[in-house]
Image (cartoon, rainbow, N blue to C red):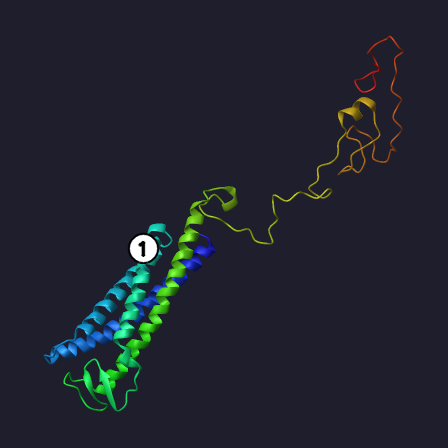
Amino acid sequence: MGVGGVVLRFFNLAIRVLQFLASAVILGIFSYFLAKHAQNDQHIPRWERAVEGLSGAATLYALLGAIFTCCLGGITAFAGLAIFLDVCFIGAMIAIAVMTRHGTQTCSGRVNTPVGTGDDGTESPAGVDYGYACRLEKVVFAVSIIAIFFFLISILFQYLLARHHKREKGFGPSPANNYTYGTQRRGFWRRNKNAPQAAAGEDTLPGHPTPHDVETGSTTEKSGWFNNRSFFGRRNNEPVSAAPTAYRAPAGEGYGYGQSAYNTNY
């Protein structure tokens, strides 16, 4: 997996951990309320049980999501299921925020809390101070709003991770990726192997005579490493002499000695 895949998986894992912490906070606070109700033989409202159940499910999902992100992150089927569940838990967190909407009130004076309604500083029948219960409910309301954004962000990262994984699967082992699976981006400092070479340089092959030059003794030499020197043993400092005049056979002699395919008269 390339650097991009590692970064996406890391951020997705971090979001799952934040989702787990947010859900665990809600679960812990309402577990405390339910335990106080049970200790004092009080009726437990249905909405408190709903908050407990939704937060427990979100905590379990975030924990499993963090584990599966490390093992199966990016697989299309897993990513699709995760996106669907993220949408569901967005709805769950919205429901928790609605049910704990009394957390927006000030926790002084007479307050409405999960353990009942009463004045701040007095103890409820559940054995919890009304002001303290109000502050706990305020924390739950704030955390549920934050968790909504965590699940929204998770949808984006799941989509990007699945898209990256699909693109990685499209590339098998090859010299471009050092015979490993996945793409490998070339740094800007590396030379493009597909770019055309310069007309003359260190990597340019030396010039050589063509078959026409061999037949006719042409003085035209190709430039290259030999700097206008012949391939056939001509001394470096010897000037190139004019090519000898090719023999032209008299008319009627045909194609014979001294002639070639380049100077024969037809």
The local crowd at label 1, few if under 14, some if 14 to 19, many if 20 or more residues have their Cα within 10 Å, is few
At x 28%, y 62%, the residue is 61
At x 35%, y 57%, the residue is 70
The amino acid at mark 1 is Leu
Q: Secondary structure at mark 1?
A: helix
Can you name the residue that lies furthest to the left here?
41
Q: Position of residue 45 (x, y in %)?
A: 16, 75
Q: Position of residue 21 (x, y in %)?
A: 31, 70
In the image, is residue 198 above or below residue 57? Answer: above
Decide which of 250, 102 is in the foreground and name it: 102
Decide which of 98, 126 is in the foreground and name it: 98
At x 37%, y 68%, the residue is 149
Tell me, yes or no, if residue 70 can be seen here. Answer: yes
Decide which of 19, 124 is in the foreground and name it: 124
User: How many labels, in total?
Assistant: 1
Q: Is residue 18 left or right of residue 110?
A: right
At x 17%, y 86%, the residue is 124
Q: Position of residue 104 (x, y in %)?
A: 31, 81
Quadrant hosting residue 221: top right
For label 1, the residue is 81
Query: From the image, which quarter does the C terminus lie in?
Result: top right
Tell me, yes or no, if residue 23 can be seen here. Answer: no
Q: Is residue 54 left or right of residue 165?
A: left
Quadrant hosting residue 263: top right
Quadrant hosting residue 139: bottom left
Q: Position of residue 238 (x, y in %)?
A: 87, 33
